Amino acid sequence: MATMGAFRTFLLSYPEILLAALCFLSLAALRLALRCRGSSVPLRWPVVGMLPFVLSNLGHLLDVATAALRDSGCMFVFRGPWLVGGDFLVTCDPATMHHCLAANFDCYDKGHDFAEMFDVAGNGLLNADAASWARQRQVVATVFAAPLFRSFVISTVGRQTARLLVPFLDHAAAAGRAVELEDVFMRFSLDVSYAVVFAADLDSLSVSAADAPYPPFGQATRIAGEAVMFRHVVPARWWKLLRWLNVGIERRFAEAKAVLDEFVYLEIANRKAKPLPQGEGQGGDLLSMYMAWPRDPAMTDRQRDEFLRDAAVGYMIAAKDLVASALTWLFYMLCTHPHVEDKVLAELESLRANAACCGGKPVVFDCDTLRSATYLHAAVLETLRLHPPAPFEEKEARADDVLPDGTRVTKGTRILFCIYAMGRVEGIWGDDCREYRPERWLSGSGRVRHQPSYKFAAFNCGPRSCLGKDLGLTNLKIAAAAIIYNFRVELVDGHVVEASDSVVLHTKNGLMVKVKRREAA
Ligand code: HEM
């Protein structure tokens, strides 16, 4: 303090030195600006680092990060403000992705900072690292592979599509009113994952609840998503201060976590008092599956309840918003590429010809029929390539390491993998990478082409890849096929659709559409 005071007195006594220092800094900044003219790579300003890049590009960070990665050869170092820190490496290089997430997996963790920002997931799989992650991954993988669970998930998706999604759109079509489709998918996804976890219906999408606000549980999951994003974009000290003061978004986040906890713990207590009946397809819900899991004798009752809570909330986080985001972008792509929609419809019509008729009622395709819908599958994958629902993946180096291009990373370096940029860089997907072309996923014989996960990383890559990939894709296809076959979906004239800066790839202004029943279209 005394040194700072003396320094200030010195500068004020010699204003010409202060002026010279300011001139020097301005000239340095100008030189830097001129040197980097024409390049999208962020400028590193004296003192404030690359913060101006973030502030001046808020609202379209994904696109400017993509341009910067294209210009920098797929990698650059982001420098935070002096003393505040926040430096990290940004990359979309497939070789680096493979190195950090697969080949050298043990050297890269999610890290403590990530777990703190994402504390709503508790100590569950999504936040765990090292031995705890390996243990939990085995449990989750076993539950997800169980036929009882899989058939429960798939039948739940079909059931909610038939009783909520299709009637809701039918009602909107009959009323001739515009619909915000992203909100519809968020509610639908909430209803599906809620039913999968708790074997109960929340019905946030029902026709009668069309204009009703989100139920408190859904509202809490929504606030949690916004708060986690906020924690990602502001310096850690900032959101920690707000948390400590219990104000603003941090206060809402604390309240949302309390709502989630209260609800889930109550549900666990009810289940313990009165377990759901087993057999005949019963007991396949996530909570029943975990409650039936052999108990670790070293666990106290409280730890066991926390384990169940983290599994339930973790599932909602992993499954809900990502599926809703994928459905939103799929329909945006179909609306803007009608020739693709026509091909998907023709494929569904050919599959429908082999299926039983249902007397003029809207058709909901089942999972077995959709296994042959390869063009629909390709259209979904192509959507995920250009619009990955999780646009970033973060890791922290546990030890010093050297990346495939020779870049040295020191222990503690944070690496941000920009999955969104990967689909949009010519060097990775070719000159037509920014075009929506499902055909790139199909071989000459019409089979779906495999792409390595370090190139197509929408479901992450390496040992920590998405455990719900198959279930997620099935969910997407059942919902999408029912909509495409029964309705024509058109963008509302003049409505602009853009990606927002968020941890899940939402739109900025929603997806406003008009829906018409096919026979009336
Ligand atoms: C389009 C839908 C989906 C996409 C794009 C997607 C993508 C991802 C991504 C990128 C990760 C890595 C996250 C991270 O490391 O932080 C992940 C992990 C995970 N996903 Fe998915 N996911 C989807 C749907 C689902 C569904 C429906 C489920 C559940 C049935 C699920 C379960 C999981 C689980 C349990 C993990 C954690 C794996 C681990 O940490 O070891 N996902 N997913």
Image (spheres, grey):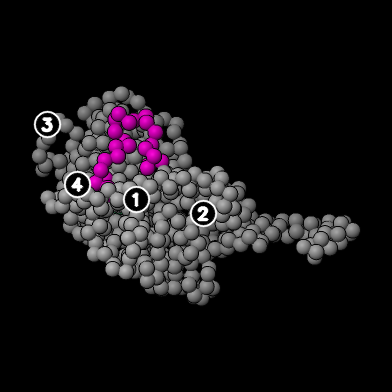
Residue type at numbered disc 2? His
Give neighbour class at mark 1: few <14, some 14-19, many 20+ (Cα, 10 Å). Answer: some
Report how far apart the C-alphas of labels 2 and 3 lie in the structure: 51 Å
Q: Position of residue 284 (x, y in %)?
A: 20, 52
Label 3 residue SS: loop
Task: From the image, tell me which residue sits under label 1.
Answer: 265
Residue 203 falls within the magenta-colored stretch: yes
Task: Using the image, determine if residue 39 lies above or below residue 262.
Answer: below
Disc 1 within 8 angstroms of ligand 1 (CB): no
Q: Please name the residue shown 69% across and 59% down the image.
A: 47
Viewed as shown, does residue 23 lie left or right of 379?
Answer: right
Of residue 416 and residue 163, the one placed in the foreground of this image is: 163
Task: Using the image, determine if residue 37 lies above or below residue 507.
Answer: below
Task: From the image, tell me which residue sits under label 3.
Answer: 359
Residue type at numbered disc 4? Ser
- Image quadrant for the C terminus? top left
* Residue 459 visible from this viewpoint: no
* Residue 245 visible from this viewpoint: yes
Report how far apart the C-alphas of labels 2 and 4 lie in the structure: 36 Å
Residue type at numbered disc 3? Gly
Report how far apart the C-alphas of labels 1 and 4 lie in the structure: 26 Å
Task: From the image, tell me which residue sits under label 4.
Answer: 155
Q: Please name the residue shown 46% across and 37% down the image.
A: 509
Of circles 2 and 3, which is in front?
Answer: 2
Q: Position of residue 170 (x, y in %)?
A: 26, 30
Mark 1 vs 2: CB contact within 8 A? no
- Which region of the structure is painted magenta? 195-219
Q: Position of residue 400 (x, y in %)?
A: 51, 76
- Choose top left, top right, bottom left or bottom right for residue 346: top left
Task: Classify the position of ligand 1 by quadrant: top left, top right, bottom left or bottom right.
Answer: bottom left
Mark 3 or mark 1: which comes first in sequence?
A: 1
Label 4 residue SS: helix
